[in-house]
Amino acid sequence: MRFLPPGAGPLCTAALTRPALLVTVCLALLPSGVAQAAPPGSPLLRVGKLAAASCPEPPIIDGGMPRTREYLTAAMRCLDRLWSARFARAGLGFRKPAVRFYEEPAQRVCGVPWPANAAAFYCTERSTLVFPLTGGWIEGRTDLYPLKVAAHEYGHHLQSLTGVRDDYEARVRSGRAPARRAELGRRYELQADCLSGVFLGSVRGSLSRTEQDWQALSDALRASGDDGDYRTHGTGANRLRWFGRGYRAVSPAACDTWTATPSHVS
């Protein structure tokens, strides 16, 4: 995934694909001078623990035929049901995101050109989850990675509903140094990784998955870390760290990336 900052395209988060890699998961006060993009008391962190829930996966491939739309539709129903119920119990307003499916990337989406190299992403201005039904992130797969990607993008919708995104984008627009803006972006993305872990942790008992399946997901997350100088999502170890925090806690309270030490959002 890649964060596109305000003014740089569709204000969305995209899951990037790279050959041979599965690409798109200890709190302490920040040292003096490190900006926080969301207050520790953010409503998102007070949503509470998700109850164990049933969310059986339909097959992505059935009888040799792709069923990616059906798979993602079922995932969205589960995500809507679980998060809307939890928000209601917490006394928070909730609205479902719009969802758009594409057989393949289009020239334009959400009113702008399709983000380069993007798979699944969230268009913030239109509260829309965008899912291509082809590509290495989902096509022909039988593992948990597509469900994790869907839950991550849904996490960005939760950030929008609770004001995290607005506060984050205001910080980005405030003219901070590029390195600081990149760190803020990683905090934003790693929180979505953590929220995807919260969801998968709540439905794990209904997924009929083996220990090997969960290990394969861990390996995929570790392989999805940033490389090179332009760092948007964090190292593989940190992506796995934050996903694991959410998975074990089954609560957004575990997902306060904004007050984590810089090394845990590197």
Image (tube, grey):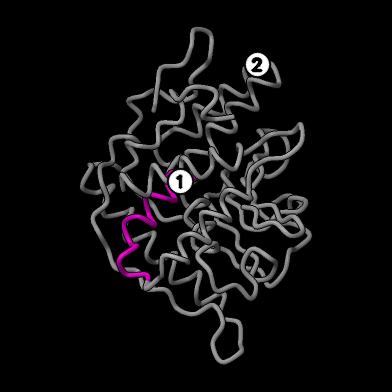
In the picture provided, is 41 more to the left or to the right than 177?
A: left
Q: Which numbered circle lies on residue 61?
A: none
Residue 172, percent from left and from top: 61, 24
Residue at coordinates 39% horizontally, 26% vertically from top-left? 27
Residue 153, percent from left and from top: 52, 51
- Compared to 129, does 233 lie above or below? above
Residue 240 or 112: which is nearer the viewer? 240
Q: Which callout, 1 or 2, points to the residue nearer the camera?
A: 1
- Compared to 221, does 30 lie above or below? above
* Amino acid beneath label 1: Phe
**Label 1: few (<14), some (14–19) or many (≥20) C-alpha neighbours in 10 Å:** many
Residue 44 or 56: which is nearer the viewer? 56
* Amino acid beneath label 2: Arg
Labels 1 & 2 near each other (Cβ < 8 A): no
Which stretch did the figure color magenta?
A: 193-207
Tell me which corner region of the image, top left, top right, bottom left or bottom right, holds residue 77. Answer: bottom left
Residue at coordinates 23% horizontally, 55% vertically from top-left? 51
Q: Which numbered circle lies on residue 243?
A: 1
Tell me which corner region of the image, top left, top right, bottom left or bottom right, holds residue 253. Answer: top left
Residue 89, percent from left and from top: 20, 47
Residue 119, percent from left and from top: 67, 58
Whether the magenta-drawn stretch holds residue 205 is answered as yes
Q: Which numbered circle lies on residue 176?
A: 2
Prevailing SS of the magenta stretch: helix
Label 1 SS: helix
Q: CA distance from mark 1 to mark 2?
A: 28 Å
Residue at coordinates 60% horizontally, 63% vertically from top-left? 131
**Label 2: few (<14), some (14–19) or many (≥20) C-alpha neighbours in 10 Å:** few
Q: Residue furthest left?
A: 89
